[in-house]
């Protein structure tokens, strides 16, 4: 019975669902040994460093990942960086298939004047900062101003805005990074404005996220009811209205119509607003926008502009994959055809399709790519895999070491009344795994 060696690079949802698809495809004639290779000392990808701390339910998918990791033939190799500790060419030679599940971690640029000013950040920096990613501990976030602007109209923009707008004591029982919680408690920000380029009917928010907003106890949420009414009128002209769009508009209308409590903290969502310049001497002081309108389903700019005085700008307009030796990046993702990159190299998740979909989207996506890989398999290679490629003395975080780190964080969390207290220091993470 042939056993094929599979290397999965990236230990986020796409990587785990790929491993699961291989495990499910095993039969009496076909088995797989799976080596999951991860740059960080910790697995789980965006479930650990992307999902907002006040949304703990979404993180419970990690239980599925732990089950996958317990299956026979699965090995975790964390604290190994592709392109630095191992090359793609070496992996290609050692494995029957190499699957890139490396995600997309670079924030897209707005491409406007003033974007480089201090306190103009990308969600790709801000989100991992409050989520205790070891590479983003030192991101400087100045929250001394009263107003912050978030640019983008998707769930990431909403997460960012909510974290800035809610009373930080609401984050006390979460796994938010300790260093971020301290800064959020000192924050002067009381007004957060989300600005989207297109109309409400084009927003990429999901209805559950929108429905959560009116539940915020210490923050009033505003949407201009005129913008929603105009969107409803435009939608009524469509032959068919998608269910997701209908749910979204209903959720936005509920926010617009909800009675406000006159609270000090405010979160506002503005549509049809394109940022054209960020102004300020040494740091962000003002954001200038052009007003847009919708004509025949198309968003077009008007001559009208407006500006918002703000001390912090966070752009959340999407992510791009980082380039790595031997991998071509095209339109912000790994160049591929239906998941096939070249030779025995494949891509899944955001690396394959760009930053779209929710965590569950990766499941069907990975399954399709695994079917393609199995169809392309030839004679299994006689090789040792990654263990033959690493320099002697390279400290690997395997599944056992990760379970020690995990247990340590969870125990610290129990003491503090949180799900876990995340360790942010790379060296300390490795020593926890060693203990």
Image: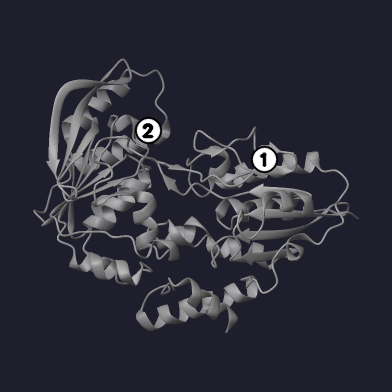
Vertical relation: 338 (above or below) 401: above
| Quarter of the figure that contains the C terminus | bottom right
Q: Which mark is residue 181?
A: none
Vertical relation: 112 (above or below) 12: above
Q: Nearer the viewer, mark 1 or mark 2?
A: 1
Task: Give the percent coordinates (x, y) of residue 130.
Answer: 35, 62
Task: Give the percent coordinates (x, y) of residue 238.
Answer: 36, 19
Q: Is residue 53 visible?
A: no
Viewer-nearest residue: 193 or 124: 124
Viewer-nearest residue: 137 or 392: 392
Vertical relation: 289 (above or below) 366: above
Task: Give the percent coordinates (x, y) of residue 20.
Answer: 67, 55
Name the image quarter holding residue 233.
top left
Residue 261 placement, left or right of 378: left
Residue at (74%, 66%) from the top-left corner?
Answer: 387
> Mark 1 — residue?
368
Q: Are marks 1 and 2 in contact (CB under 8 Å)?
A: no
What SS does tag 2 mark?
Answer: helix
| Quarter of the figure that contains the N terminus | bottom right
> Mark 2 — residue?
245
| Residues packed near mark 1 inside 10 Å, few (<14), some (14 to 19) or many (20 plus) | some
Spatial separation of the CA atoms under disc 1 and disc 2 = 27 Å
Name the image quarter holding residue 394.
bottom right
Viewer-nearest residue: 227 or 410: 410
Mark 1 and mark 2 lie on one chain; the one further toward the N terminus is 2
């Amino acid at each position: 019975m042939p056993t094929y060696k599979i290397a999965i690079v990236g230990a986020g949802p796409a990587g785990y669902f790929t491993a699961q698809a291989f495990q499910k495809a095993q039969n009496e004639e076909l088995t797989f040994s799976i080596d999951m290779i991860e740059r960080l000392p910790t697995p789980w990808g965006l479930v650990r460093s992307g999902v907002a701390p006040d949304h703990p339910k979404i993180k419970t998918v990690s239980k599925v990942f732990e089950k996958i990791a317990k299956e026979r033939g699965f090995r975790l190799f964390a604290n190994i960086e592709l392109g630095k500790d191992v090359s793609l060419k070496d992996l290609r030679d050692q494995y029957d298939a190499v699957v890139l599940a490396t995600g997309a971690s670079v924030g897209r640029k707005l491409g406007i004047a003033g974007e480089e000013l201090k306190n103009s950040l990308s969600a790709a920096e801000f989100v991992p900062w409050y989520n205790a990613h070891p590479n983003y501990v030192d991101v400087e976030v100045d929250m001394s101003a009263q107003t912050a602007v978030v640019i983008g109209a998707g769930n990431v923009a909403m997460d960012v805005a909510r974290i800035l707008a809610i009373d930080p004591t609401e984050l006390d029982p979460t796994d938010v990074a300790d260093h971020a919680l301290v800064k959020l408690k000192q924050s002067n920000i009381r007004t957060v404005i989300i600005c989207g380029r297109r109309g409400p009917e084009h927003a990429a928010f999901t209805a559950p996220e929108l429905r959560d907003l009116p539940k915020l106890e210490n923050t009033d949420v505003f949407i201009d009811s005129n913008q929603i009414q105009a969107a409803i009128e435009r939608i009524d002209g469509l032959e068919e209205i998608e269910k997701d769009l209908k749910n979204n508009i209903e959720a936005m209308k509920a926010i617009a119509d909800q009675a406000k409590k006159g609270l000090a903290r405010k979160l506002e969502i503005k549509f049809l607003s394109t940022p054209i310049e960020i102004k300020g001497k040494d740091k962000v002081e003002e954001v200038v926008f052009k007003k847009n309108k919708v004509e025949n389903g198309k968003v077009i700019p008007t001559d009208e502009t407006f500006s918002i005085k703000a001390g912090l700008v966070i752009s959340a307009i999407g992510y791009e994959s980082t380039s790595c030796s031997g991998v071509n990046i095209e339109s912000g993702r790994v160049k591929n055809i239906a998941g096939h990159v070249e030779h025995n190299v494949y891509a899944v998740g955001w690396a394959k399709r760009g930053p779209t979909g929710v965590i569950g989207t990766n499941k069907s996506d990975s399954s399709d790519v695994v079917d393609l890989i199995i169809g392309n398999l030839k004679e299994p290679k006689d090789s040792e895999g990654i263990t033959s490629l690493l320099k002697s003395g390279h400290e690997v975080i395997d599944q056992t070491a990760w379970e020690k780190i995990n247990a340590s964080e969870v125990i610290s969390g129990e003491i503090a009344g949180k799900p876990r207290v995340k360790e942010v220091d790379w060296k300390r993470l490795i020593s926890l795994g060693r203990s």
